Each structure stands twice: as structure tokens, then as C-alpha cells.
Image (cartoon, helix red, strand yellow):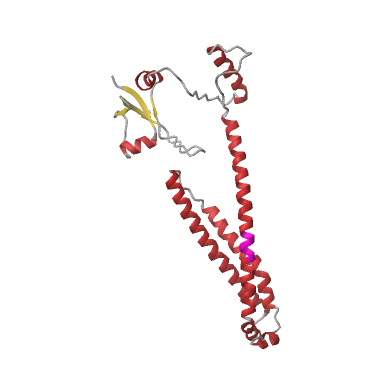
Amino acid sequence: GTGACLIGETVRQQFFGAGDPEGEIIRVNRTSCKIIGLLEPKGYTGFGQDQDNVVLMPLHAYQRRIAGNRDIDNIYIAADDRTPTSELQPRVEDILRDMRRITPDRDPDFAIRDMTQIADAMTSATTTMTGMLGAVAGVSLLVGGIGIMNIMLVSVTERTREIGIRLAIGAHEKHILIQFLVEATVLSLLGGIIGILIGLSLAGMASMALTIPFAPSPAVILLAVGFSALIGMVFGFFPALRGARLDPIDALRHE
């Protein structure tokens, strides 16, 4: 006879598109089952696994028709809101020891993993990775900033005569300062935008290759653009100030 099963959103999209799958019959391995419901979409796990690419059916039907044995590899246990997992874990271990006839003096032949511990470990690893990437980004910004400062110092030196003419015909120090600050900011901003476009392209290709969702954050992109402009302003200030403080007579005499 035909068994019953529940399917995830990914399975529905693959087999039925946007249609209603309820009442349809699908084949799982060598057995057929009738779809009696659709599971709520859950998205991806932190490890990049699609939680919606799933078909659920009664345990006995699976063991009899598909697995061919009564082995159970994993059991997922959900605690209610009032019971902490730290309290639940020893109780589960006691039950499993009784069922598997393992005396207290022997090591268990099973492992119990608390999801909160796994989540804490993942958070710790993510924090470490974020710190390392932040340090690399900081060094990159420093090197880029020094590069901009050098280019702007060369630009000020090469345009000494131009600065002298501008000062001689009535330009104030602040006008020269603003001119070179704007140039440095635009230079770093363009570099930042090109970097973001390359980064998004590489992330897009990686997400396609690894079949993980591509979800760029507009806030992070804006922050990166703002940082690149800020680097231009900070590192462009000294060359701009040097240009603004040039003596017009010395500047005009410069060849």
C-alpha cells in the first residue's frame, strides 16, 4: 500500500513548483507515499545544510520499506521552555543506558550533543574568524591609506606651480586644502567601490559553487563605502595641508 509523508519547501519546489502538493503521490527509493502536508520553511543551518530538502514519514514505514533494518543513527530531542538542556541531558543518558543495558561503571557506546554547546562553539569560532578578518582588513586599510598619502604628496609636489598661481590670484588656504582632500576622498572612494564590486562578484560565484544562499547586507556595503571615504580624508589631510601652506612666491618660482 501507499504510505504517508510530509515534504519540505525545497522538495515541493523541485517536484511541484508553486503548486499544492497535498494528496499527490511521490516515490521515495523503492516505495511510494502520499503527501499529507507541507512543512514550514526553515531555511539553511549554520553549516550550510538546507533544512527544507526533506521528506518525513513514519519510522516503522521507513525501517521496513527503505532501510531494511531497525537501526537508529540519530535521535533529536526538544526540551520544553521550562526545562534547561543541561538538566535534560543526564536524564536522557540514564534512559539510554537502561535501554542499552550499560552499567554505570562502563563508558556509554553513544554520544549526546547539546545544541547550545555546539552553538556556543560556532559563535566562538565565528568571533575568532571575524577578529582575524578584521585585523587583515585593518592592515589592508593602513597600507591603502599610506599609498593614497604617498600619491597625494607626489601630486602636491608636481602641482606646486599650479597651487602658487591659485594662491597668487586670491585662493585661500582652505580652498587648496578642500581641493586636495576631495581628490584623496574620491580616489579612495573609487577604490572602495571597485573593491566592493569585486568582493560581491567573488561571493556570488562562491555561493553558486557551494550552493549556499547569497545574501549581501546593504548596511555592510554602505559601511565599507563610508570607511573607504574616511580613509581618503584621514590620509589625504596631511598632503592637502602641505599644499595649502605653500608660500605663493616659492610655489610660483618652482620648476
Placement of the C terminus among the 4 image quadrants: bottom right
Task: Give residue 190's position: percent from left, percent from top.
Answer: 53, 65
Residue 245 seen in the current view: yes
Number of marks drawn: 0
- Main secondary structure found in the magenta portion: helix
205 vs 107, left or right, is left
Placement of the N terminus among the 4 image quadrants: top left
Task: Give residue 99's position: percent from left, percent from top.
Answer: 53, 12
Q: Residue at x 61, y 80 (%)?
A: 159
In terms of depth relative to the viewer, which is nearer, 120 or 166?
Answer: 120
Task: Give residue 207's position: percent from left, percent from top.
Answer: 45, 47
Q: Is residue 112 magenta?
A: no
Question: In the picture, residue 89 is in which quadrant?
Answer: top right
Q: Is residue 143 magenta?
A: yes
Part of the protein shown in magenta: 141-146
Q: Is residue 52 above or below residue 236?
A: above
193 vs 158, left or right, is left
Q: Is residue 37 above or below residue 203?
A: above
30 vs 186, left or right, is left
Q: Residue at x 60, y 39 (%)?
A: 123
Residue 84 seen in the current view: no
Q: Residue at x 64, y 52 (%)?
A: 135
Question: In the picture, residue 26 is in which quadrant?
Answer: top left
Task: Give residue 25's position: percent from left, percent from top.
Answer: 29, 28
